[in-house]
Image (cartoon, rainbow, N blue to C red):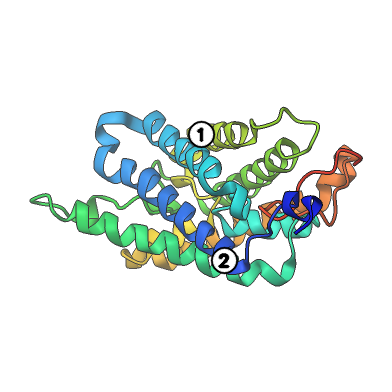
Amino acid sequence: MSRDTASRPVTPTLVHRSAAEAVGTFWLVLLGCGTAVLAGDQVGFAGVALAFGLSVVTMAYAVGHVSGGHFNPAVTAGLAAAGRFAWKDLPAYVVAQVAGGSAAAGVLYVIASGRPGFSLAGGFATNGYGDLSPTGYGLAAVLVAEVVLTAGFLYVILGATHHRAPVGFAPLAIGLALTAIHLVSIPVSNTSVNPARSLAVAWFDPAALGQVWVFLAAPTVGALLAGVTFAVVTGVRRAGEDVDGAVESDPRR
């Protein structure tokens, strides 16, 4: 093996990348939704927001170099729309993210139900509008919040992963953005911006499952809007350079 070949980065397989996405999404749902369900009364909205942000930061550093650290079907779709991820790999990522998040919700249910008097009627970190909104926000408000905040989240991701951004700090910027998003929108919709996170806990609540379409559609629309407009707005065009563990930034870009 030549020295040049030995120094060349090894491309993770789609199986490994998908597995990393499942693990990362599992962690996000377990820590974020788990904090809301098990410790929400103690830490409040700010504590829950921080838990979601920290879950992304820690797993982005742990497995982001393998899969890109999406942990969110909307993020994957938005990156594909921006030309930063291969559309052909999107189904595998989405399946892995939904499976990982759903597994985490199952673990959370087992833990939460171990407390005497536990009832899903007390909340399971589900998202909703109207009567299912934490403070009664209607459908229109929830749709706008989820679309706009997810679009902003994608702008942060696309910008923070640029080679001119401070090296090694992208996970911090992305995690802090997710924390800020939760601080704004927990009272509105209990914050989704992530279809896998919403679906994972909705399986356990028929009422939430009836509204989950909003939290599948709105974040996806917001992410796609960001993906197709980022290069136009910023002038930064990096089509063909995946946000994953397979491609290193080219300093000539």
Instruction: Check the picture and name the quadrant holding the C terminus.
Output: top right
Q: Percent position (x, y) of residue 93?
A: 59, 65
Q: Which residue is mark 1?
A: 179
Q: Percent position (x, y) of residue 62?
A: 51, 44
Image position of 184 with respect to 129: above or below: above
Residue at (70% x, 55% y) in the render: 246
**N-terminal label among 1 and 2:** 2
Q: Are marks 1 and 2 in contact (CB under 8 Å)?
A: no
Residue at (52% x, 34% y) in the render: 184
**CA neighbours of label 2 inside 10 A, class few (<14), some (14 to 19), many (20+):** many
Residue at (81% x, 51% y) in the render: 4
Q: Percent position (x, y) of residue 163?
A: 79, 36
Q: Which mark is residue 1?
A: none
Q: Which residue is mark 2?
A: 94
Is 29 left or right of 155, judged from the image as shown?
Answer: left
Image position of 230 with respect to 20: above or below: above
Snapshot quadrant of residue 86: bottom right
Residue at mark 1 to residue at mark 2: CA–CA distance: 23 Å
